[in-house]
Amino acid sequence: MKKLAGALGVVIVSMLTGCTPRIEVAAPKEPITINMNVKIEHEIHIKVDKDVETLLKSRSDLF
């Protein structure tokens, strides 16, 4: 009876250890590439006084 209980215990333990999930964390073999195709457009609007605007129009050599 003891042999049967011992054998049954070994069978149950071996069955339970065979069903345990295994989690594996490994680095990828290829490097991770991030493709960022970004298009940036901007507009700058400057508001000036009429006096400064006429000065800039009359003296175009300032800038």
Image: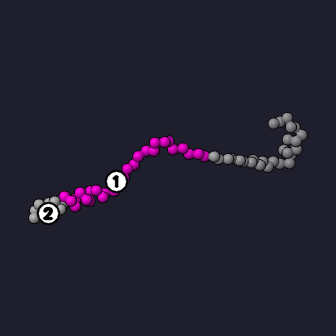
Closer to us: 59 or 10? 10
The N terminus sits in image quarter: bottom left
**Circle 2 Cα neighbour tier, 10 Å, few/some/many (<14 / 14–19 / ≥20):** few
Residue kind at label 1, given as amino acid type: Arg
Which label lies toward us, 1 or 2?
Answer: 2
Mark sitting on residue 5: 2
Judge from the rendering whether residue 5 lies leftward or rightward of residue 28; answer left or right. Answer: left
Residue 5: quadrant of the picture = bottom left
Residue drawn at x 41%, y 46% as measured from the top left: 26
**Magenta range:** 10-36
Q: Is residue 6 above or below residue 59?
A: below
In reply to whether residue 56 is colored magenta, the answer given is: no
Residue kind at label 2, given as amino acid type: Ala
The C terminus sits in image quarter: top right
Query: Furthest-right residue in view?
Result: 58
Residue drawn at x 36%, y 53% as measured from the top left: 23
Judge from the rendering whether residue 35 lies leftward or rightward of residue 11; answer left or right. Answer: right
Judge from the rendering whether residue 47 lies leftward or rightward of residue 25; answer left or right. Answer: right
Give the image location of residue 34, x and y in percent: 56, 45
Closer to us: 30 or 39? 30
Mark 2 secondary-structure assignment: helix
Secondary structure mostly seen in magenta is loop
**Circle 1 Cα neighbour tier, 10 Å, few/some/many (<14 / 14–19 / ≥20):** few
- Disc 1 marks which residue? 22
